[in-house]
Each structure stands twice: as C-alpha cells, then as structure tokens.
Amino acid sequence: MLIECGTRAVFAAAFGPGTAGETTYAERMLDRLTSGTLVLLDTGFDGYSLAERRSG
C-alpha cells in the first residue's frame, strides 16, 4: 500500500497471494508515484533497482 504519512490516506494498493512477494506488488504501484514524491520503504526494499525503474 502507498499511504500518505500525515493523514494516513491510502492512495494506492495492490493485492494477491503472499507467495508473489512485496516487491512484485510494489512494482504495480510505481506509476502512482510522481516527481518529488518522498517514499519511505522498509528493509525488504533496500535495493536501488525498484527506484531506478520508476525514474527510467
């Protein structure tokens, strides 16, 4: 889920089986991020490749 920190409003979500993994669902929401968006990620997203796909 993508959640706004101040209001906790959900502005994107992806669902499916747990066997697919978090990064699979994160990729489905990359188009919801805009230039200048600050994204806080947990330890499962410590690689640069996900962010690089959004900017590319």
Image: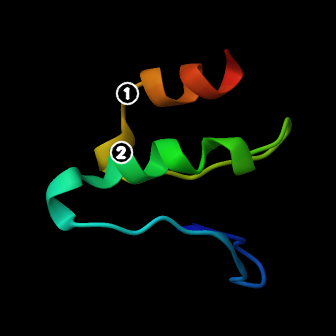
How crowded is the residue under tag 2: few (<14 C-alpha within 10 Å), some, or many (20+)?
few
Q: Which residue appears at 48% of the width and 41% of the height?
A: 27
Q: Position of residue 50 (x, y in %)?
A: 48, 30
Residue 4: assigned label: none
Q: Give whichever of discs 1 and 2 has the lower sequence position.
A: 2
Q: Secondary structure at mark 2?
A: helix
- Name the amino acid, label 1: Gly
Q: Position of residue 20 (x, y in %)?
A: 22, 52
The residue at 72%/82% (across/down) is 9
Tell me which residue sits at (35%, 45%) in the image: 24
**Cα separation between marks 1 and 2:** 10 Å
Residue drawn 41% across and 53% down? 25
State the residue position of label 2.
23
Give the position of the C terminus as an image quadrant. Answer: top right
What mark, if any, has residue 47 been given in the picture? 1
**Structural crowding at the residue carrying mark 1, measured as other residues with C-alpha within 10 Å and reported as few (<14), some (14–19) or many (≥20):** few
Name above or below for residue 5 compared with residue 21.
below
Residue 15 found in image quarter: bottom left
Q: Is residue 32 above or below residue 1?
A: above
> Would residue 26 appear left or right of 39 to someone viewing this image?
left
